[in-house]
Each structure stands twice: as structure tokens, then as C-alpha cells.
Amino acid sequence: MFNIALFGVGRIGQVHAVNIASHPETCVYSVIDPYVEGAQKLATKYNAVIQTVDEALTDPNVHAVCICSATDTHANLIELAAQHGKVIFCEKPIDLDLSRVRDCLAAVNKYQVPMVVGFNRRFDPQFRAVKDQLNAGVVGQAESLMIISRDPTPPPAEYSKVSGGMFRDMTIHDLDMARFIIGENPVSITAQGSCMVDPAIGEAGDIDTSVLVMNFPSGAMATIHNSRRSGYGYDQRIELHGSKGLLKASNMKENLVEHWGETGCVAAKPQHFFLERYQAAYVAEWQHFVDVLNGQTPNCTGADGEYALMLADAAIESMKTGKTVML
Amino acid sequence: MFNIALFGVGRIGQVHAVNIASHPETCVYSVIDPYVEGAQKLATKYNAVIQTVDEALTDPNVHAVCICSATDTHANLIELAAQHGKVIFCEKPIDLDLSRVRDCLAAVNKYQVPMVVGFNRRFDPQFRAVKDQLNAGVVGQAESLMIISRDPTPPPAEYSKVSGGMFRDMTIHDLDMARFIIGENPVSITAQGSCMVDPAIGEAGDIDTSVLVMNFPSGAMATIHNSRRSGYGYDQRIELHGSKGLLKASNMKENLVEHWGETGCVAAKPQHFFLERYQAAYVAEWQHFVDVLNGQTPNCTGADGEYALMLADAAIESMKTGKTVML
Amino acid sequence: MFNIALFGVGRIGQVHAVNIASHPETCVYSVIDPYVEGAQKLATKYNAVIQTVDEALTDPNVHAVCICSATDTHANLIELAAQHGKVIFCEKPIDLDLSRVRDCLAAVNKYQVPMVVGFNRRFDPQFRAVKDQLNAGVVGQAESLMIISRDPTPPPAEYSKVSGGMFRDMTIHDLDMARFIIGENPVSITAQGSCMVDPAIGEAGDIDTSVLVMNFPSGAMATIHNSRRSGYGYDQRIELHGSKGLLKASNMKENLVEHWGETGCVAAKPQHFFLERYQAAYVAEWQHFVDVLNGQTPNCTGADGEYALMLADAAIESMKTGKTVML
Amino acid sequence: MFNIALFGVGRIGQVHAVNIASHPETCVYSVIDPYVEGAQKLATKYNAVIQTVDEALTDPNVHAVCICSATDTHANLIELAAQHGKVIFCEKPIDLDLSRVRDCLAAVNKYQVPMVVGFNRRFDPQFRAVKDQLNAGVVGQAESLMIISRDPTPPPAEYSKVSGGMFRDMTIHDLDMARFIIGENPVSITAQGSCMVDPAIGEAGDIDTSVLVMNFPSGAMATIHNSRRSGYGYDQRIELHGSKGLLKASNMKENLVEHWGETGCVAAKPQHFFLERYQAAYVAEWQHFVDVLNGQTPNCTGADGEYALMLADAAIESMKTGKTVML
């Protein structure tokens, strides 16, 4: 049984808490959060202790940390955990600043601690099936990838500042997915964005609608289609066109019941948001982390986090300059 | 070019007129209908002459007749046409009375005139694809067939008397389809019906909702699910379960556009009724009749019409007695 | 925290063990099974003790029993548990013999112990959505229900004897579902069956393919379409036609990825069998049992189990006599 | 009845011939093609005369011309027809050279002759339904349009020269569709292309795979995804994301039959190519031309043809320079 110290008891921390507790090889050993009431509640539920950061990192019973705290604490906690030899699971992003990410990863490397970064979608069974079928040669060589990713409703405009903007916060998942599916690093990126959803987002200097085009060494191309507001739930789809055909991963709907009536054939909407849509992905992601605890090599690393952030920065540059950015 | 004498200028007569005129080997030569105004309109449109029954049948330029007049005129017209050596296309049914049908077919046989009976669904490309795939062995041996057939809206209650009731008017298509798909004649039939849609239909002695079960010599079973009112257009589906899998023919929708919005994912309804749904079937049916004019053997004959009526009568008996009728 | 004594560590016992352990209000307290090795394995996994039947039923720490042992032990265990005041969850069926079921239920009644019978499909979110939408008036009055239920592959022929035959073992779920959806008790049942899948099943006196028709007081009808072998996974579908439209619950597929290629558009098969298809149903079913432990009235009772068995017996009689059985 | 002079008896000329002959208000009056045998065959079929270009244009019985001849004859024939006051239907493109197009349109303008240019997809009932629903406000303001357009198999490499390259030949339809759906003229275009399908196409200086991004004054964006080879039939889809939801026009498949078997659920491929996919569009297009003959204003004009070619040229420039082209 691996004892996990859980940093952060917000929405995503609670998701991981359930999976940690359900997994036969892990338990929520301790909870760390300045928000005392929330920490207490979670600790009670999982029979865990409440610790300070120092207590958790110096506690020899703690085997690993699960970092779900505020974004601006990630890099520090990673460095501290690495220093104390704890295996690290960290929610993305490592940091919003690329040079800070690089310093942090240098520290991790120095202490040789395994780290998994939480790009949850890599573990989604639907997208994994696309990747597996591509690898199995079902559609031949990848030629054209289309990633459609739309949130159900936009965040408050002020969130743009905390989050680093849409490309660093939201598109970063899709940038990583493009690399993951194609299996290459892009040679160039071209980004276009506009503010169509909420003028306040534009006033805050951010965008809410965008199209990105990536070119890969093999000649393959990928497009990413983002919006902060779908109007119909969480739109998470992938289409991969290859030399022998197409692979399509459709949305998961709230249920499979259709109503046929006077106004048409009505099916349920896509599942509401990431907590529903990626439930199975979070379970598979945690399973991978347990495999890493058992000695397996991480397949979603700090370097992947760094790469995705670098692409997000390049996309911002492309959008600002109106030019393709060569990588 | 084959000259066709068209009997009846109602809804179905007009459907055939278009197909006769569009086909490179046939033309609407003459129109016969006591409703003068309608006959005149069609004659003008297709550059055809107006004839009486006698004129049409004795005109040596008429190669074939297309009988789309009122049901109670079919048998007489068939006999007259046979007598005059005209090749016959007749809309179903030949007659609502089984013994009258048998007499009529005896006349046709005597004069050795080819006749095609208009079970339009046999020519539908969707159902034909099911039949073809079954014949090609795609699902192995047929085990269980499900025919779902629902009209969009019920006819007026008084129509029940003219039409011979739901089994003879509507279900008869499905009874023929079951024989066509399975490729065997059933050994028994069990019918259940109720009046759920319009009490006036019940008062007129008819039903509007029914389930039929047919058993075939091979052990295969078929069910027919009918309603006089769907609430969502014309519901015309077939599912064939065989020893190696399932074949499903779904409804054709008004269009292929989906709207995803707050209330769900809305697709178009099934096409409204038989004129839309079976447009391609009517074209294929007429092509078959032209093939017959060119010497091919009819594959949907008077005997098929007789058999389907016999099954409808057996279904009525089963419903009334509450027993399975052995055939 | 409610302590559960788990009787039976087979396939279905293991499903319940996971759900008992995952639920925040229940734990696997003890395991009872004559198969020592299996019991030991499960006990170790869940930190549970191994008990005999007597020990479990007399242990004041045991709040409830979860009966997943062999079918022929159910009735006895239910009676013993009722006698000792334990709240009862029992997998279906209570017994294969209707009079034995009635005696058993009398005992339960006498001791006033709440009991839930495991008709898992009643708790399936898909079918529940159909029921909820019907209750909400989305399709008006229920007119015609179609239940399609096909196992992926047939059981060994010898299983027919242990199981009580297809109607008592497999169709019983669909009989219960028809009552559950329509919300009425049927007035008659007509059954047809044949042996199309495996001749050995026929030699053992059972069938493997069947169609049932049920009539309800409101005039509504239901058909049940069963096969012991689908050829394409577990086929579990419901269609409810009402006065205002249709509700369709489709199969859950292994994944949502489609491959479009030369031979067509290929989607994944339906999920393999009940463990996959009804995973969410088992979780919801256990949640209901916890609600019962907390005082709620059971909504899937011994009487429901008795009723479904009575219908299965009537179906057998109908098939043997070739007549509709009035209830 | 309008007499039509048909120029060109190739594949597309034959499509129009059927529609001209089927329409109650038009007939194939004469056929003009240097390929004598083909012209003779069509003339016989439709009871038409064979004419030279001069004969057709000076024949007072000819009301309109349908230009389906080789691309490099279009502009000359248009000018001649305009000079002789014939109403003009011309297959796209008017010419591959933008200045030649402009000269030609000036001539048409001078003679005030109505002209319809054959962007067949504008008349497709599926895409028209998207446009109609957008206009009806179903999805609010247009934000993001995705046009997926893939041919089943690539043309021979040498075709690149005759056709003006992929952007001018194939993408031009999608460029027009983007303007048609969004209802605005784009402010910029960014194009990326590569040669993934056939190296010979690359050697001929053309591409076979591309992604285009267009920006519109309202902030809306459109992407066009092209490939010369799908591997699964003709891929013709549109997705329009608006402020209130999404509209999706899916592919039309060869049939609606699904086969569920061991390897999955197999549906038919998309229809093979434009002759099948746009059959209904060609009929609707011809209906529009008849409406123009009856005095209606053309809704797909020479100016639309010019605009689309200008966009194709801009896309070529963008691809070559690696920069967004401002319009």
C-alpha cells in the first residue's frame, strides 16, 4: 500500500482522492491545504491525517505526493518533493512561465525522482483507442488530425490572468494531444484567435475562440478548434485522417436514450464537463501513476509539460504577429 | 418505347406517371379516370390522350396498363387487360376478397399475361440491401426478423371499411416483407391487436395497434409491430438477427443535419410518409416492370398478392379467436 | 458504516464486493463461501473476516447480508437472515420453484425484514432514463414496448437444468423490465420459442430463441425478443412507443471510436456481457440498498421476484400449449 | 418549354442532360460537342439535334445554353452566348485565370444576360438546411465553420496542370461554401498544404492535402480540410458552431443498413463521389436555373465564381509565402 500525501482539496483534488482511495494499492494518507475546513472534511472521509507541507515531505510514511493545489504553488512543491525523494504526481501545468518550468525540471532531474504530469486526456479510453488503432496500422500513415475542444461555458473574465490565457490554460491539453497522437514534434505552428463569447475576456487581453494549425516533419498537419463556450456541454472530439481511412472519437453523451417526436429525434447532450467526460481517464491516469510507483517509466512527463507550454507560447506569438512560428 | 395506359390519376397514379415519363423506355400514352379534371391535367402535362377503359384496352398502341384506380376496380381491370393481352402493373391489393383474387388470377393465368403487383417495399434499396446481405451469408441463417411499421397519422375511421381493416390494408405490406426477407412461407401466425390511437377506429370495428408473430419452417420467427400513428413521421425499419449477427435497416430522415444545443442533439425526423420514403423504391419497381416488358419474369406476382391477403385474413382470425392459426 | 456479510465469492459476488467497499457507508465485514481459497482471497483484499453461515447470522456486528451464493441456497439463506433480523440483498432468483418462493416470502414478511431483490436492470441509468421520461409525459401514454435481449454466447447445454431454462433464467429479467416500464401487471402472455443456436440445448429440453407478447390492462402491448447468442456482444435495447412518440435506449458500445475505411464505417461492438454493460446499474443498485439500510422502502422486492417467476412459468405454459395464457 | 443547347457531353454534361429532360419546363433541344459519337448518342436519347457552336447560338429556338465543355472553352462560350442574348448556365470555373474571368464577366454585364455559375453544393439540400437553420437563428451568430472535403481517390498527376491545381479546382467549392454559409466576405486567408497522397502530384508542382483558415469581419473563422484521397468515399461534411450551439451536416451513406457482427458494427461508406452525393443538388440547381429563365434573379453568379477564384489565388500565395494574405 502506497501512502499518498494529497496537496489541495479543491475540485480536482477531490477527484484524485476518490481514485486514490478506490485503488487497492494506494490510500489517502494525509491532506495538505491552507483551507482548513475543506482539508478537515476530506481527511475525515478518508481516515487521513492533516499535515503541513513540511510534515508531509519529511514524513517517511509518505511514498508519493499528489499535487492539486493552486497553479502558482506547483513548481515549488515539485522541487521540495523531489528534494525529499517523494514520487510526484502533479496536475498540469508545472508553471505558467517556461523558464520557471525548466528550472523546476532540472531539480527533478537532479534528484532522479519519477514524475507524472496530469495530462488526463492521454489516458482517456476513447483517445487511447484512436492512438492504439493508429499504431496498429488501421488507417495507415497519419495525414491530418482535427481536435475539437470546447468548454460548456466560459470562465469569468478575471480568470484569464490567473490561468495564463486560453492557450496556456485550455489549448495546452490539445497541443499535448496533437503530439501524443501524431507521435512527432511539430515544426511550425500558426494560430488565429478572436473574442466572440464574452467581450470582458477580450478586455482582459485574452481570446475565447481560436484555430491553430500545426505542421509535423512527416508532412502531417493538425488543427485545433477551441471555444470557451459550446452551448451544448463539453465538446471533446478527435478525427484522424490517414492514408487508409479515418478514425473518429465522438463525444460521450449524458445517456443513450433517444426521443423521437414531432420536432425530431432528440438525443442527450455531450456530458457536461471534464469531471464527467474524463472520469475513466482519471482512473486510468492514477493506475499509470501506481505503475510508476511500482517501477514503470512515466509516459507523461515533465518534459511533456514543458513542451506543451512551449507550444502554447509559440501559439501566442503566432497570433500576435500574424505569422507562422517555426519551432 | 412502351406506351402505358394509366388508370387512375390520384396520389399514387401521379407517382407512377412521373416514373413512367422519366424512364427512357416508357411514356404515359393515355390516361383513364372518371374524374375528368384530374385526367385532363395529367394528360396535358405528359402529352397523353384521354381514353375510356374500352378505348385503352382495345388500342393496339397500348403495350401495358398501370392500374392505380380505386381498389374495387382492380380485379375487373386486371381481367379485362389480361383478356386484351396487355402487360399488367397493378397497385396492391388485387382485391380485398380472397376468392375474388383467386378468380382474377385464374383469368390472368389463362391469358398468360405477365403481371407485376406493386408491393413497393420489395424494391426499396434499403430492404433490398438487407435481403442481398442475407443471401450473401453476411449474418448466416435467419433466426429472428423484426419489422417495425408505423404510419405518421391515422386515416379517418370510416376508411377502415373501404380498406378492409388495418391487417388487409397496412400490415399486408409487412406480411409480404416477412416472406420476402425470410424466403419461406410461414407455418403459423399469431396476432394481437388493440385500439389505442383513435376510439372511432375501434367503433368502426378495426384496430390501430398490433403485434404479429410468424413462425417459419426453419424455426425462424418474425414479428410485425404496427401502429396507425407514430408521432414522428413514417417509421419503417427492419432488423434481421441471424446466426452470425444482425442486419438493421434504419429510417431515412428528412435530412442529415443535427443541431446540438441546450436541450440535446436534435436530428431530423424520419421522412413523412410513403411518397417520400419509398421514392427510390417506386423508381426501382418501375424499372422492374420495364424489365418484365422486355421479357424478364416478374418477381412480385399475383400469387404474392394472394399470399399476403391470405396471411392478413389468418391474422384477423388469430386476433378474433385468441389462438395461433396454423397455415 | 454498515457491515455487510457477503455470501458467495463467484463472479457476481466479486462485483458486489467492489461496490460494497467503494461505497462510503458500507464495508465487506465478512465473507462466507464453502470454496475456502476464493473466500480467503476476497477476505484478504477487503480486510474482512471469514465466517460460517451461523457465525455471520448470529454476529451482532453484521447489519445486512448480500446473498450471491448458488441459486438453490437463496431461499434458505433469506429465511435464516430474516429470522436473525438482518436486512437482505439477494441476487435473483429467490428460487426456481414458485411455491418455495412464496413460502420464503411469507417468512420474510413474518419477520418484517426489508429485502431487495437484484433485478439489476431496473437500476440501469439508460433504462431508468426511459422510465423517467415516460413518467414525465415525454411520449404520452405507453402503447407498445419492445425489449431486445440477447446474450453474446450460449451457456453449456447442461446449464439449462440448473438454471430452470431460458425463460426462468434469462427472460425473467425482461419480464420484470416490462412490468417496470409499463407500470402495470399484464393480463395475458403468449410465448413462442425455438432452438436455433445449439441443438444440445434443445435435447436438454430447453430453447434458445424466443418471442413473447404481453398484453396490459391499458391496451398496451410488450414484446420480448431473446436469443442465447447474438454474435456481436450483449444486445440490450428497449424501445417504448407512446401516444406522442418513441423512446429508444440503445446498446452501450465498447468505445465511441469509428473507423471509416474501404469496407465501410466500423464502430465498436456492444459491450461484451452483463459485467461491463450493467456496471453502473450495479453501483446504483447498491446505492438503493444503502438507502434501504437507511430506512427507505425497497423498490425492487421479493414480490417483484415472485411476479417475474410467475410470468416465466406462464410463458412456459403458453409455449407448451400454443395458447395465450390469461393471468 | 425552354429549349436548351447543351455544350459538352462528358460526365457532367450527361448529368445535366437528365435533369434538363426530366424538368417539365426544359428540354434538350440541341447538343454541341466536337466528340461526334458522344454527341450523337445523347442527341438520339433525348430527341435532340446536333449543332455547331454557331448554329446553336444563332438559332432563335435556343433559349438558353448549358455549358459543360472543357474548362478552357467556358469563357469564350459565355461571351458568345451573352452576345447572342442566350441565358447562361455554366459549370465552374469560368476560367482559371482571374483577369480572363473579369473580362468575360464584363461582356456578360454589357449584354445584360442572366448567368448562373454551377457551384452545385450551394444547392445541396443538406448544406442548404444548415444555411436555413443559421438564418433562422437556431445557433445564434456564426463563430466557427469547419468544411471537410475529401475526394475518394486522387486524379492523375498530370491533371494538376489542366485543373489549375488543387486550390483552383477542388478547394474552390469549399471557398465558395464558406462565403455562402457565413454570408460575409473574408478579410484574410491562411493556407498550408503538403503532398501526402501521391509524390507525382508534388513533382507536378501541386499539393494533395491542405488546411485553410479564413477570417471574417464579424470575427468568425472558417477552416477547410482537403485531401485528394479519403480511402472511404466522398467525404463532404460541414460543422457550424454558433453562439447557441452547433449544426452538423454529415455524409450521405451508400445505404442505411448496418451489420453488427464479431468485428463490430459496420455501416455503409459515404457515397462514392459527386455524381451520387450531389444528385439532389444538381436537380435543385437546375430548378434554380429554370426559375432564372422565368425571371428570378440568379443567386449564384459570375461574381461568385470570380470571388472564389480570387480566394483560391490568395490561398496559393499564402501557401507559397507562409504568410496570411489580407484581402
Image: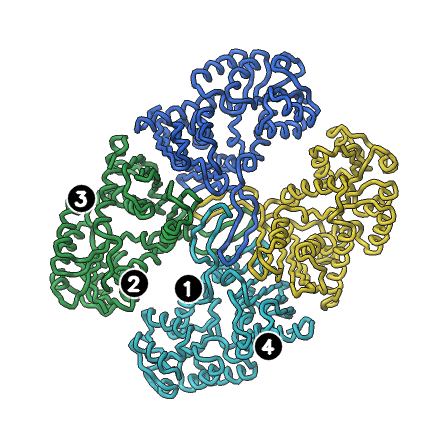
Chain colours: A green, B yellow, C cyan, D blue
Chain letter of the residue carrying label 1:
C
Question: Relative to residue B21, is residue B212 depicted above or below?
Answer: below
Q: Amino acid at mark 1?
A: Ala
Q: Which mark is residue A19?
A: 2
Residue type, label 4: Ala
Same chain, labels 1 and 4: yes
* Residues at discs 4 and 3 both on one chain: no
Q: Quadrant of residue C174?
A: bottom right
Residue located beneath label 1 in the image: C280
Q: Residue at x 32, y 52 (%)?
A: A121
Q: Quadrant of the N terminus of chain A?
A: bottom left
Q: Label 3 near label 4: C-beta < 8 Å?
A: no
Reply above or below: D284 against A295: above
Looking at the picture, tell me which residue is in the foreground, B156 or A4: A4
Q: Is residue B182 left or right of residue C146?
A: right
Chain ID of residue with mark 3: A
User: Could you tell me which chain the residue with mark 4 belongs to?
Assistant: C
C-alpha separation, residue under disc 2 versus residue under disc 3: 30 Å
Q: Earlier in the sequence, mark 2 or mark 3?
A: 2
Point 51% across, 65% down: residue: C152
Q: Which mark is residue A97?
A: 3
> In the rendering, at what x and y percent does residue B28 appear?
76, 33
- Placement of the C terminus of chain A among the 4 image quadrants: top left
Element under disc 2: helix
